[in-house]
Image (cartoon, rainbow, N blue to C red):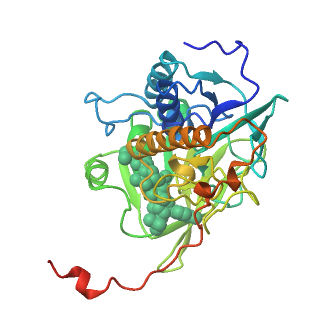
Amino acid sequence: MADENAPRPAVEETMIIGSGPAGWTAGLYTARANLNPLLITGNDYGGQVSITYEIENYPGFPEALSGPELVEKMKEQAEKFGLTTVYDHVSEIVTDQHPFIVRTASGKEYKSKSLILCTGARPRYLQVPGEKEFTGKGVSYCATCDGFFFRGKDLVVVGGGDSAVEEGLFLTKFATKVRIIHRRDELRASKILRDRAFANDKIEFVWNTVVTSINGEEGGSVNGVSVENTVTGEKSELKTDGVFVYVGHLPNNDLYHGKLHLDEDGHLITDKKTRTNVPGIFAAGEIQDKVFKQVATSVGQGCSAAMQTEKFLAELESEGYHGGVDPREFPSYAPFTATPTVTAKTPERELVPA
Ligand code: NAP
């Protein structure tokens, strides 16, 4: 296991930013490739998975395990092969010079030949009156962290995706009743979770409904929500002791604005090889994945990014890189174009078997 306080090289081979499944996997693979990687955890240690009560669809763990347990296992495995973990938050990256520069909240500055960005995503807010005011006083985004405080209470969960239903099910361990308020009359959540929720006596669905405000006494905690039916327009009040918000996630892209190409939803644009538009900078996990967002897919993308990084560094060396040379000028690193090229329909003759 690498020592966090051991002296580091003047220029790192590779640095990984983020400590979710993509980051630890990139750490494991780059460590096993002898690249002496450094991973900076970020403030949200473990990412989204660390606030997930139970993971039952990550292969290799038939008995299921908790999110924090999985994070610790991934960390332990990567460190066993030489990954160095630094508990700090990246405040800035400089991408228009090489080696790249990484600055952290604690005032450290690193230089690195390559970067693997795994900064993940954070919960999206409902953005209704009362949400900010009552956060920590009945409004929560983490059932695993806060569910215990609502023993014997009535709760509301907002959203209709996997997170809302899965965490709603978890909350039934503590609450007497969990109402899942969804803006449509059909869940986005997967069938297995839908079926479990429909079979759970403590769960009640409030369909075609949006929360318009979260209410409570000034200085006190949540005592209800105002809702509106999206079909009839009817407005009403629901009493509740707590509101758990699961209306999706937003990519953690603050570091990349004006530096790397982002899509219209704020995800980093990468090609199939996990390359961003800057050669030597790769991205994996929810920061660049707007489709799958599973632990298993993040792990796969972290692995791909690490393998591409290894290839990039090997090519850099074979080009005779000794520092001071800008690899972006090497012809083999012509950045891939981030503007999607829409190609015409495949010519029909190519579809006809030979
Ligand atoms: P999601 O799939 O994007 O679902 C967000 C839900 O919130 C949707 O039902 C959406 O409604 C609703 N919503 C969005 N904005 C809203 C608003 N302003 N007001 C009210 N409702 C709003 O997000 P997620 O559930 O966090 O899941 C994210 C990803 O992680 C998904 O790919 C999911 O499969 C994955 N995940 C997987 C597991 C698992 O495999 N066990 C567990 C958790 C998450 P509409 O449906 O009408 O759009």
Q: Is residue 325 above or below residue 158?
A: above
**Quarter of the figure with the N terminus:** top right
* Residue drawn at 59 percent across, 50 percent down: 123
Q: Is residue 14 above or below residue 280?
A: above
Residue 228 spot, x, y in % from top left: 55, 70
Res 191 → quadrant: bottom left
Task: Give 215 or 34, whichever is nearer the viewer.
Answer: 34
Q: Horizontally, is 346 left or right of 338 in the view?
A: left
Residue 288 visible in the current orientation: yes
Residue 50 spot, x, y in % from top left: 52, 33
* Residue drawn at 62 percent across, 23 percent down: 85
**Quarter of the figure with the C terminus:** bottom left
Residue 319 spot, x, y in % from top left: 62, 43
Residue 32 spot, x, y in % from top left: 47, 25
* Residue drawn at 55 percent across, 30 percent down: 149
Task: Give 251 or 55, whichever is nearer the viewer.
Answer: 251
* Residue drawn at 71 percent across, 60 percent down: 129
Q: Is residue 141 above or below residue 71?
A: below
Task: Give 345 or 247, whichever is nearer the viewer.
Answer: 345
Q: Horizontally, is 204 left or right of 335 in the view?
A: left
Task: Give 112 or 48, whichever is nearer the viewer.
Answer: 112
Res 16 → quadrant: top right
**Identity of the residue furthest to the left in this view:** 354
Residue 182 visible in the current orientation: no
Report the number of numbered marks. Answer: 0
Q: Horizontally, is 265 left or right of 59 in the view?
A: right
